[in-house]
Image (spheres, helix red, strand yellow):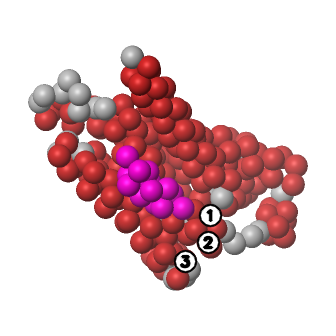
Amino acid sequence: MLSVGLDASGAGWTLVWLWLALIASGLYHGVNPGMGWPLAVSAGLMERSPRALLGALGALSAGHLLATFLVLLPFALLFVLAEWQRPIQLGASLLVIGFGVYRLVDRRHPRALARIPPTQLALWSFAVAVAHGAALMLVPIYLGLCQAFDLDAGHAAAGSLIKANLGMAVLVAMVHVVAMVAAGGCLAWLVYRYLGLKFVSRSWFNLDAVWAASLILVGAVALALNFAS
């Protein structure tokens, strides 16, 4: 009985840490200027309207949400194969690490992003989230939550399991984007209301190396947890 209680307690803490990691990743993406909050400030200042700023944040959020869900979707479908769950998790961890190493070596801004008009913020946000691995970073967290919730228990039919996995994918994407908008929106409002774009141009800092390192860190932690389990 004691061991069962300890196992349940451990599973509970695993869930807590996974949700906290998901929220932290959203806050991190929101603070990162590369995810677009300066564009929302620019829209607000150009039209001299807080509504323009909020509208730009909404478009950025929609693009990021779509990219996140579409990246999680293949893993949601693959995770139905219960006997392949561990190899899928290991493969996802290695994929995130590999992409992080690639971004660390090649820090050039994807040229395709420069061809997207500034007015199409949702499309720009979608492309940035895919190109820079923002959505990919959530895959190990998502797979960990699926395993922690034991979504295959009580779902004999593949259709029911797919529905459960897709529901988790939507929830993960929503929680992440809400945290991202909260952080990025607060920064955008402070700059718009009090500091102005001159502050952004003077204090701009490059987070490419930090971003790549964070991808490697997330993948490495997920890999270590897989080997430990």
- Alpha carbon of mark 1 to alpha carbon of mark 2: how far? 9 Å
Q: Are circles 3 and 1 on residues that touch, CB within 8 Å?
A: no
Q: Position of residue 85 (x, y in %)?
A: 25, 48
* Vertical arrangement, residue 101 with respect to residue 70, above or below: below
In the rendered structure, the answer to whether residue 213 lies left or right of residue 149 reads right
Q: Amino acid at mark 3?
A: Leu
- Alpha carbon of mark 3 to alpha carbon of mark 1: how far? 15 Å
Q: Which residue is mark 1?
A: 34
In the displayed orientation, state which residue is furthest to the right. 194
Q: Which residue is mark 3?
A: 104
* Vertical arrangement, residue 221 with respect to residue 142, above or below: below
**Upstream in sequence: badge 3 or badge 1:** 1
Q: Are circles 1 and 2 on residues that touch, CB within 8 Å?
A: yes
In the displayed orientation, state which residue is furthest to the left. 157
Q: Residues within 10 Å of mark 2 (few under 14, many from 20)?
A: some
Q: Amino acid at mark 1?
A: Gly
Q: Position of residue 169 (x, y in %)?
A: 36, 40
**Upstream in sequence: badge 3 or badge 2:** 3
Asked whether 88 falls inside the magenta stretch, the response is no
Q: Main secondary structure of the magenta part?
A: helix
**Upstream in sequence: badge 1 or badge 2:** 1
Give me the residue at 32% from left, 53% from top. 89
* Viewer-nearest of discs 1 and 2: 2
Q: Which residue is mark 2?
A: 208
Give me the residue at 42% from left, 28% from top. 7
First to last magenta residue range: 217-229
- Alpha carbon of mark 3 to alpha carbon of mark 2: how far? 7 Å
| SS for callout 2 | helix
Q: Residues within 10 Å of mark 3 (few under 14, many from 20)?
A: some
| SS for callout 3 | helix
